[in-house]
Image (cartoon, grey):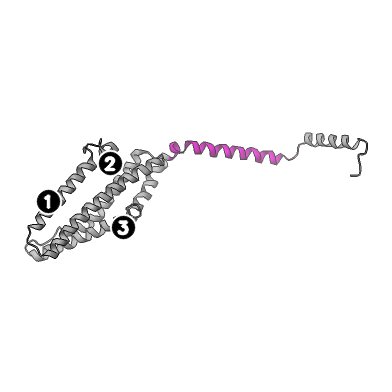
Amino acid sequence: MFEKWENWKGNGTGDGVKERLTQAMNLAVERHEVYVQSSGLPAELKEMALKTAELTRAFWLALTTYIDDEYMMLISFKLSPKHVLLLLSNQVVQICDDMFAHRSRGANVDLQDRAAGITRLAWCTLQAHSVMSSYVAQKFRNHPSISGTFVRFLTRHMTDAAPSGCEDLVKRIKKVEDDLATLKRELAKGVSQADFDTFKKRVEKFMEKPGGNRNA
């Protein structure tokens, strides 16, 4: 889904995938409104139909904002751009799968029974909107499905990335371990005979001074 970040963002002239899809979304909402307004539906049904289109556009804008923010945040943690894009790709696929689980139930609608068919498709649409609303309400990042993709991402990709990304930390830990081992060896030796003899001579020299107390 995200091969290169530059392809998604573009160069600011509307040539990125994000801008093209946003324009397509806006056009779809406009055409949807024209269709609904000329459909001859009761006012309450028109209002609901128009509302679903606006909610879909709001969902799309929230999703693109999440993608941009999440990419910048993860990159700031010194993660590989390639791995971050793979994670975001998996998340978008997961979101689409969650919605498709409801939308696919409209595939076997009986077109001969118009009323039943319309009711079934409307219900599937509202169920998909429920999924979208849950993602927006939990700001995408806190949604259980997103959490699941992140755990899988860490499990599958961070093991290989860790040595290069944490090289400095690994060196610092190794130095601390070496210093600790050296300290343990020195402590295990105790006081050497040479140190003891030197200290004894200093004490004896002190005791030989006038006024020195040999019984102290």
- Crowd tier of the residue under label 1, counting other residues whose Cα lies within 10 Å: few below 14, some 14–19, many 20 or above: few
Q: CA distance from mark 1 to mark 2?
A: 28 Å
> Residue reaching furthest right?
210
Q: CA distance from mark 2 to mark 3?
A: 24 Å
What residue did someone put label 1 on?
Answer: 31
In-image side of 153 versus 42 (left or right): right
What residue did someone put label 3 on?
Answer: 137
Q: Position of residue 84 (x, y in %)?
A: 34, 42
Q: Hey, what amino acid is under mark 3?
A: Ala
179, 51: nearer the viewer? 51
Task: From the image, state whether disc 2 or disc 3 is nearer to you.
Answer: 3
Residue range of the region highlighted in magenta in the rendering: 162-190
Residue under the point 50% across and 39% down: 169
| Number of marks in the rendered image | 3
Q: Is residue 207 above or below residue 127?
A: above
Task: From the image, state whether disc 1 or disc 2 is nearer to you.
Answer: 1
Residue under the point 22% across and 56% down: 55
Disc 2 to disc 3: CB gap under 8 Å: no
Q: Hey, what amino acid is under mark 1?
A: Arg
Most frequent secondary structure within the magenta stretch: helix
What residue did someone put label 2 on?
Answer: 2
Circle on res. 200? none
Q: Position of residue 137 (x, y in %)?
A: 31, 57
Q: Position of residue 121 (x, y in %)?
A: 15, 61
